[in-house]
Image (tube, rainbow, N blue to C red):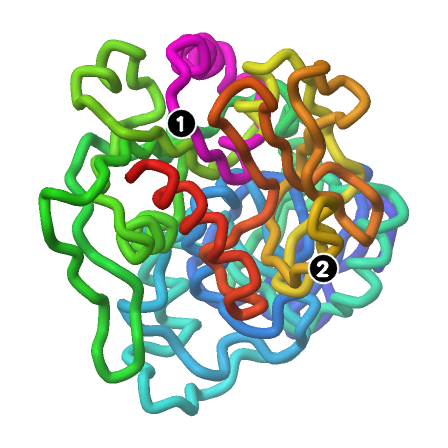
Amino acid sequence: MATAKYPITPKGATGVLVLADGTCVFGRGFGAVGDAVGEVCFNTAITGYQEIMTDPSYAGQIITFTFPHIGNVGTNPEDVEREAPHALGCIVREDVTEPSNFRNVQGFDAWMAQTGRIGISGVDTRALTRRIRMQGAPNAVIAHDPAGKFDLAALHEKAKSWPGLVGMDLAISVTGAQREWAGGVWSLGQGYAQGEGSEKPHVVAIDYGAKDNIFRSLVKAGARVTVLPATASYEDIMALNPAGVFLSNGPGDPAATGEYAVPVIRKLLDANMTIFGICLGHQMLALAGGAKTIKMHQGHRGANHPVKHLEKGVVEITSMNHGFAVDAKTLPDNVVETHVSLFDGSNCGIAFTDRQAFGVQYHPEASPGPQDSFYLFEKFVGGLR
């Protein structure tokens, strides 16, 4: 890494990450050609890079993968969380190799290029991760030029001028249209299961940037699911006569999205609607109850995060992806903390004592345990019968 203004691009470098402080990290570009500006974070998962890249919660972010071998199993149309990637790009240690997996349909390099996402390989990702841990998640520009010609001053200026995620509502840009959801979870050799039966309890899921596997998990738990966009009103929701309402994950600052979402959630709470929130949905449920959220120093992203269930006294191995958190010190008297991170003690779950509403900061649909947290879907849907 170099901090001079501006270093000479090393021979063979076709990719660069330019941080807002002027630091330039060079490597070998792959995927799409061009540049993109966002926040640099790191993810500690060993598998699931395609799911991670297509998770809408990563909108506005550039992912540093701490596992060195990314791309070696290729890509396929089943391992996606939405129809297209939402992460801006990724930074990896080793070059992307030819795929070696019987499920591969397209190489990761080609998939990145086709979907317009930029990658850089050959980077010391351990050093970059340590920097993020020590100094926080920086704003940066990721760029790829096969000729290795970069206007570093212009890229630096773009990184400096990007406002950052605080105060940014990104849910509005990744939410989907109203739709009925029928598919269940995936299994090898079977594909996605099909949900059926109108007699099942009806869940209205608000899509703030949801991972599709959340909807599949609701179906597996026994629900019939209708998905509504992030801007759905209280009247829109109640017109569907739901037995319960689910609040999804999503990107950006929960306080910003909460400007239009929290008043709706408060009305649902006042109507004593059964509510379950995950990640951003969990944060906005807390805001609706009167708590506050805070921007984290580096965030939590990976498939190996230990979370303690305070009432049961057990530890769940969870999947996480968030840069904001609920400030547990601001929880009102009628909201209790149910889960905490064993990494840093940050809030990972809440429950209302006078309402049928609860939320968790992690992703129970991601199966890192692998089934440590599926009980949350069963708790939610089972309470609707």
Badge 2, how many Cα within 10 Å: few under 14, some, many 20+? Answer: some
Looking at the picture, how far across and down is residue 84, in whole percent? 32, 52
- Whether residue 83 is visible to the viewer of this picture, yes or no, is no
In this picture, residue 305 sits left or right of residue 352: right
Q: Residue 228: which quarter of the image?
A: top left
Q: Quadrant of the N terminus?
A: bottom right
- Whether residue 193 is visible to the viewer of this picture, yes or no, is yes
Q: Nearer the viewer, residue 11 or 289?
A: 289
Q: Nearer the viewer, residue 133 or 340?
A: 340
Identify the residue at image location x=76%, y=18%: 330
Element assignment for label 1? strand
The residue where tag 1 is placed is 274
Badge 1, how many Cα within 10 Å: few under 14, some, many 20+? Answer: many
In this picture, residue 200 sits left or right of residue 97: left
Q: Nearer the viewer, residue 165 or 324?
A: 324
In this picture, residue 139 sits left or right of residue 88: right
Numbered badge on residue 315: 2
Q: Does the CB distance between marks 1 and 2 fall below 8 Å?
A: no
Report if residue 313 lies within the magenta region: no
Which amino acid type corresponds to the residue marked 1 in the rendered image? Answer: Thr
Q: Quadrant of the C terminus?
A: top left
Element assignment for label 2? strand
Magenta residues, as a range?
253-282
For marks 1 and 2 on the same chain, the one whose residue lies earlier in the sequence: 1
Looking at the picture, how far across and down is residue 328, in whole percent? 76, 27
Numbered badge on residue 309: none
Identify the residue at image location x=58%, y=68%: 369
